[in-house]
Amino acid sequence: MSAFEEIRNERLKKLELLKEKGVNPYPVFAKKSSDIAEILGDFEKLSEKNKSLNIVGRIMAVRAHGGSIFFDINDGTGKIQAYIKKDEIGEENFSLFGDAADIGDFVGVSGVPFVTKKNEKSIKVSSWKMLAKSLRPLPEKWHGLSDTEERFRKRYLDLLMNEDVRRRFALRSKIISEIRKFLDKDGFLEVETPVLQTLAGGALAKPFKTHHNALDMDLHLRVAPELYLKRLLVGGLGKVYEIARNFRNEGIDATHNPEFTMLESYEAYRDAEYLMGFTEKLIKTAVVGSLGEDKVNFGGNEINFGGEYPRVKYYDLFRRYALIAEPEKATKEDYALKAKQLGVEVKDFEEREKIMDNIYKKICRPKLIQPTFIIDYPAGASPLAKRKEGNKDLIDRFQLVTGGYELINGFSELNDPIDQKERFKEQDKAKEKGDEEVSPSDEEYLEAMEYGMPPAAGFGLGIDRLVMLLTDTHNIKEVILFPTMRPGK
């Protein structure tokens, strides 16, 4: 029998002991005065009143000294020491706690607040109640686990034993809250669009496929909400956004998880130029609102979100970092040769813009540490973006890159249904050649566009990557509560 099995068997015996004593180890009701954090914050006044308090939480440590037992209770808001004395609580209740209670159990205690000789805020227990008996021991040194993937598989233990992890996810929630407040204040309407879609469009990504039995039809998990959000522009909603859970059947690495969170936002009668200023203000507001400052450390670099974000042309990055003298004139073959020289894989079906993008992601983007807007992309880089006025070879698109990560992708939305249909046809040709990531032709979306879609601008913001940047975290699994994992043994 393993050590774990022995411990679990002992706890099962304690569970039976509680039942034999007439104690329900998993009662419905738990009496609670207030959160531990509130009690600690108002401790002096509560001590003066000498009023009995009801505290609930998990036992995190136990220290027995003859006729006295000290134990720490944590309710998720804070930790406080509880003190049981045999002479005051009675021998039967004292013995039952000593015989049946373990670290990890949830208990409720009643008692008055006091300060120990060591000046520790504590509760002198007059009665206690088992709220939930734990059968497995908590890890003693969670930080020291050699298999870090177990932290992600058993996030509940990671949160329980690692205060830094709890703070990180609390900050994630705060960041999303600040983004919502910014958009709501500006008059945007938060909406929800389908996760199950007949066509998974709106992004260059391979979708997950499923089947609906009742309708006997194949469906896809959405790769992006874009085409449905733009239908709402057709329907007369001028400002919409969705904080969407997206799904892409792609590889898993430090910055990619098959299930992730994006903000997508669209506003009628705006363009990419306006949107760059708007998104810069959004990022600055979210950073200061959640952190209280505009500078963060990431990977040994100080990133200043508070300054002005420079703009760099896409082609200029290839001149500067890939050492291509005339990137605008370079052909598909030129880029394929350069890619191979730089160790970037080139697939047979990939067109010029796809090869360029792969070079950019490996060679150029990692060099961009401070918040920087990339502008003036080639026309083939996005099938849903408008061409630039006066230069049909470019699209009116931008990306915001920080810390080497793409944070935001935005553009002036293509609202010409004839042009959009031709773009879709080009995408279909690429799909026939073997590119599984292209956005397919969507006849229903084209029909909606033909009713008239206003000029508009939209953007997507990667929530997970923003949290990574603001918490100096370098693995996306650290900022997703339950990342996609192979099952443990």
Image (tube, grey):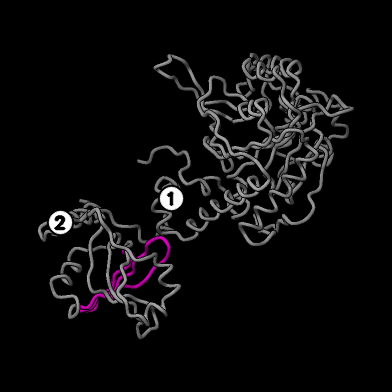
Residue in view at x 85 percent, y 24 percent? 392
**Within 10 angstroms of label 1, few (less than 14), some, or many (20 or more) residues?**
many
Q: Quadrant of residue 365?
A: top right
Residue in view at x 22 percent, y 56 percent? 7
Residue 370 on the magenta span: no
- Considering depth in this image, is 42 or 461 the residue closer to the camera? 42
Q: Which residue is mark 1?
A: 151
Q: Residue furthest left?
A: 20
Q: Is residue 305 visible?
A: yes
* 333 sits to left or right of 194: right
> The C terminus appears in which quarter of the rendering?
top left
Q: Which residues are magenta?
A: 59-85
Percent from the top left, x then y, of residue 476?
Answer: 55, 45
Q: Residue furthest bottom?
A: 117
Q: Look at discs 2 and 1 and give the one toward the viewer.
A: 2
Q: CA distance from mark 2 to mark 1?
A: 29 Å
* 91 sits to left or right of 476: left
Disc number placed over residue 13 in the picture, else none: 2
* 25 sits to left or right of 321: left
Mark 2: secondary structure? helix
Residue in view at x 76 percent, y 20 percent? 416
Residue type at mark 1: give it.
Answer: Arg
